[in-house]
Image: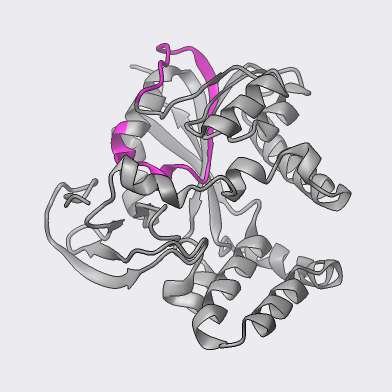
Amino acid sequence: MHLVHCNFCKRNDASLLFTGRDLLHGIPGSFDLVRCNHCGLIYLNPQPSVDELAPYYPEDYEAHVGTRKEQLGWLRRLDYRYGVEKRYRAISRYIQTGRILDIGCATGAFLDGVRAHGWQVEGIEPGVRAAAYAQEELGIPVQNTSLEEAQLKSESLDVVTMWNVLEHLSDPQTALIKISRALRPGGILVFAVPNILSYDHKLFQSYWAGYDTPRHLYVFPPPVLEVMLARAGLELAERRCIYGTYNAFVYSARFAMMDRIASQTTRSRLTQLLQAIPVRIMMMPLSRVVDLLNRGSIMTWFCRKVAAS
C-alpha cells in the first residue's frame, strides 16, 4: 500500500468518505476511500500495488470469464449480444468503420461483435487467461499487458473503447493522454465509468457497486473528468447511460443485503428473485426511464480528439 496525491489537482488534502472492503469476492482487507477537499475527485488512499491487487482479480472474476460462449446459457448469450450491439450502434453514430482498440477487452466478446460489422479490431488485456481466450478461441490480436506497458502507435486508431476500465487504473490522467496520442485527429474515445450522480448511489451509499473497493481506485465527478479529458486533447461530445443499469442495481442490492440480512439463504433467494427473467422484464421500463434521465450507475462518455490547429 502506498499513499498517493490527487490525480487531478495533485494536492495532498483529502477527507475520508468511508472504509470499505471487498464486497464482490469477500477477500479480506480494508480500504480507505477519500474525497479531495479541493477538486472533489474520489480515490482510494493508500492504494494497493499491482501485486497487492492481484488476489482481488481471481480466476472467477466476471469480466474475465463471464463472456466465454461455452459458459453462458442461451438467454445470457442473447442478453450479452444485445448489449454489444447497443454499444456498437452508439459508436457507429460517430464513425461507421475503421480500426478499433478495446482496452481491457477481457475475453474479446465486444471486439468479436464489432468485427462482424467489418471493423479491424485489437485489444489490450492484462489477464492471462482472458487474453489467451480472445487470441486462441476468437482469433483477436491482443496485447497481454497493462495499458501503461502497451505499445500504441501514434495516430493509428479511429476508435478506442474502455468499458468500466478507467476507474481501475492507477494514473487515469496519463492513460487518457496516451490514448489521445494513439487516436487519429477526429477519432473518438468511448468509455464507461461509474456514475456518481446515479440514483443507485443515493440509495445504496457505501454499498453502491460503483465503489467496488479495492478494484476501483477512482470515482470521477463529471466536472473533474471533463477537465481531465480536455487536458488530454479530447473534447466531450456527449455522455449518456446506455447499458448495465439493472445489473448494477442488482449488485448494489446484493452488497447492501450482506450487512442487513443475517441469513445467507434469504440473501441468496432475494438475489435470485431480482435476477429472475420475469422480474427483469418487469423492471425494463423503469430502467429505461433511469437511463433517459442519465441516472443509471454506468455512464458512457463519447469524446472526440481535437484536431491540431
Q: Is residue 185 above or below residue 200?
A: above
Magenta residues (range)? 149-174
- Colour setting: one colour
Q: Is residue 289 above or below residue 45?
A: below
Q: Is residue 126 magenta?
A: no
Residue 96 placed where, x, y %?
Answer: 69, 23
Residue 109 placed where, x, y %?
Answer: 69, 34
The residue depicted at 79 percent of the width and 67 percent of the height is 280
Q: Is residue 121 above or below residue 278?
A: above
Quadrant occupied by the C terminus? top left
Dividing the picture into quadrants, the one containing residue 265 is: bottom right
The residue depicted at 23 percent of the width and 70 percent of the height is 16
Instruction: Depth check: give the residue in front, 127 or 157.
Output: 127
Q: Is residue 27 left or right of residue 175?
A: right
Q: Is residue 154 magenta?
A: yes
The residue depicted at 35 percent of the width and 28 percent of the height is 148
Dividing the picture into quadrants, the one containing residue 138 is: top right
Instruction: Depth check: give the residue in front, 58 or 298.
Output: 58
Residue 201 placed where, x, y %?
Answer: 48, 71
Residue 93 appearing in the image: no
Q: Is residue 32 above or below residue 91?
A: below
The residue depicted at 81 percent of the width and 73 percent of the height is 279
Q: Is residue 217 left or right of residue 260?
A: left
Residue 189 appearing in the image: yes
Dividing the picture into quadrants, the one containing residue 139 is: top right
User: How many marks do you count on the picture?
Assistant: 0
Residue 219 placed where, x, y %?
Answer: 38, 56
